Amino acid sequence: MRPVSDALLLDVASISATLLGLLVVAVFFYVETGLRRLDQAHEVFAAYVRAAARLTMGLYLVALTTALALVALEPGWARAIFGATGLAVLASLVEFTRRARATAKLMGTTSWSRLQEILVWACVTVALALPWLLGVAVPDREDLTWGILLALGLGLVSTLNMLLSVFDIAKFENAARTRHDE
């Protein structure tokens, strides 16, 4: 990999901050409003969306904080920030997995959910472990950049998945209302 410039890292931090802000607006003003209108399994779906939002925010924060740390701080601090935010992402991934399983069970989509779960765990694990593997336990600026870029990409995919899942929730809710009305 070519040397990573401060300009690239600041651009990645800007993109991460922008996507994080848009996610906050989307979740708290639009998605949350829609969730309040649910009649069936409101708690299960709301918990799932909160867990998905927490995971997605964590991925954006890995990219944002580590990119800024690489520009402004010594490499040791950047490694510590990447590690700490990575641990927070893993904790939120455990919670997301629990909530996704409950949602899939309710909606009857457990086989597809299991495949998604495996993919999410694999991708997040690679993104968080790759810098440590490339740097042989002491990642440098270029190694951490791989983790930053993967976290940013996974955050974007997670955002899209979360927003698309809202359509699945609405479809489930409409089907449940139709069954109830019959």
Image: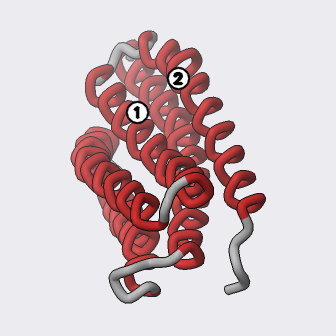
- Which residue is situated farthest in the front direction here? 74
Q: Where's residue 89, x and y in %? A: 35, 52
Quadrant in the picture for the C terminus: top left
Q: Where's residue 30, x and y in %? A: 58, 19
Determine the residue positioned at 36% across, 70% down. Answer: 125
Q: Amino acid at mark 1?
A: Val
User: What crowding class fits label 1: few (fewer than 14 Cα within 10 Å), some (14-19), or many (20 or more)?
Assistant: many
User: What crowding class fits label 2: few (fewer than 14 Cα within 10 Å), some (14-19), or many (20 or more)?
Assistant: some
Asked if marks 2 and 1 touch (Cβ < 8 Å), the reply is: yes
Residue in the foreground of this view, choosing between 41 and 154: 154
In the picture shown, does residue 111 fall above or below 92?
below
Quadrant in the picture for the N terminus: bottom right
Left or right of 181? Residue 98 is: left
Determine the residue positioned at 58% across, 69% down. Answer: 145
Q: Amino acid at mark 2?
A: Val
Q: Which residue is identified by label 2?
A: 31
Left or right of 2? Residue 25 is: left
Q: Where's residue 161, x and y in %? A: 54, 48
The first of marks 2 and 1 along the sequence is 2
Count all numbered tags in the image, as a single digit.
2
Q: Where's residue 53, x and y in %? A: 44, 37
Which of the labelled discs sits on residue 49, or is there none? 1
Q: Quadrant of residue 9?
A: bottom right
Determine the residue positioned at 40% across, 33% down. Answer: 49
In the picture shown, does residue 22 fall above or below 82?
above
Residue in the foreground of this view, choosing between 174 and 99: 99
Left or right of 30? Residue 84 is: left
Q: Secondary structure at mark 2?
A: helix
